[in-house]
Amino acid sequence: MSSNTRALEIIDLHAGYDVSNVLVGMSLHVGSNERVGLFGPNGHGKTTLLNTISRVIHPRVGHVRFMGEPINDLAAQKIVARGLIHVPQGNRLFPDMQIMETLELAAYTKCAREELKSNLDYVLRLFPRLAERRRQQCKTLSGGERQMLSISVGLMCAPRMLMLDEPTLGLSPKLKDELAEAIAEISSRGIPLLLVEQDIAFILSLVDRMYLIDHGEIAREIKRGAEVDHQEIMDMYFGSEHA
């Protein structure tokens, strides 16, 4: 892949549920070494976008390209096999499986199987709490531990790009800080990142650029180093009484 190739490119994307469109002409991109954030209120299309990219939802109009190749018509498992990995919100783990079983099961593609040992060593170093609890069932883990495991499952898939949907949802400030350090470490390995978050301070601490999402469209793009009025952004979405 050329250094100028965009890892992900979304062009005029329309998608939704039943007869309603949630995404109404969304266009954005993630560079080959970028961390890009998505911020906006619930129901405005952030999760729908990630679900459409990973083909949980089929796009109605528009184009999705990954590493320069169109993926609109690929099945979800083929998108995973190409290395575009989506870690959804909600810790969707098998509750009765142990941590180690869950991690090993995640490495099911050919590339992931070849990298299983090195990726397993990496995630257990990245999240030592999982190494300590490796024989525990998923249902016995705390919310923070489940989120660490969910991200680790994504890493076991040998990602060429990672999409994280609200990884800090419901977590304490201390656990948010731990996850921020882990996400920064993951990105330092050259893995492009698309990060959805509701915590604007958290997201701005991690990304190179941020897109503001409003009713299924890009309302604004904010680049690293730009002056940002956090209060103005929060008021734009939630009104002056949001606090």
Image: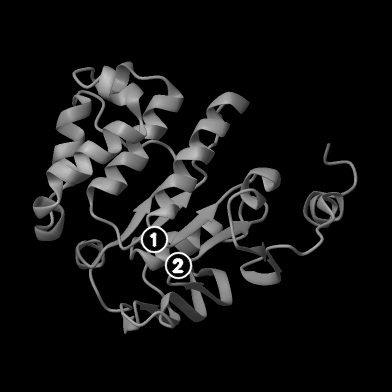
Residue closer to the observer: 216 or 77: 77
Q: Residue shown at 80%/58% (left/top)?
A: 228
Mark 1 is surrounded, within 10 Å at the Cα level, by few (under 14), some (14 to 19) or many (20 or more) other residues, namely: some
Q: Label 2, label 1: how many angstroms apart (C-alpha)?
A: 6 Å
Residue 71 drawn above or below residue 165:
below
Q: Is residue 42 visible?
A: yes
- Check disc 2 and report the residue beneath it: 33
Q: Residue shown at 29%/47% (left/top)?
A: 155
Residue closer to the observer: 21 or 76: 76
Q: Position of residue 168 (x, y in %)?
A: 53, 37
Residues at discs 2 and 1 in contact (Cβ within 8 Å): yes
Going by the numbered disc 1, the residue's amino acid type is: Gly
Count of marks overlaid on the render: 2
Is residue 142 rendered to the left or right of residue 108? Answer: right
- Check disc 1 and report the residue beneath it: 190
Is residue 103 rendered to the left or right of residue 5? Answer: left
Q: Quadrant of the C terminus?
A: top right
Q: State the image quarter where residue 226 is shown.
A: bottom right
Q: Position of residue 26 (x, y in %)?
A: 57, 76
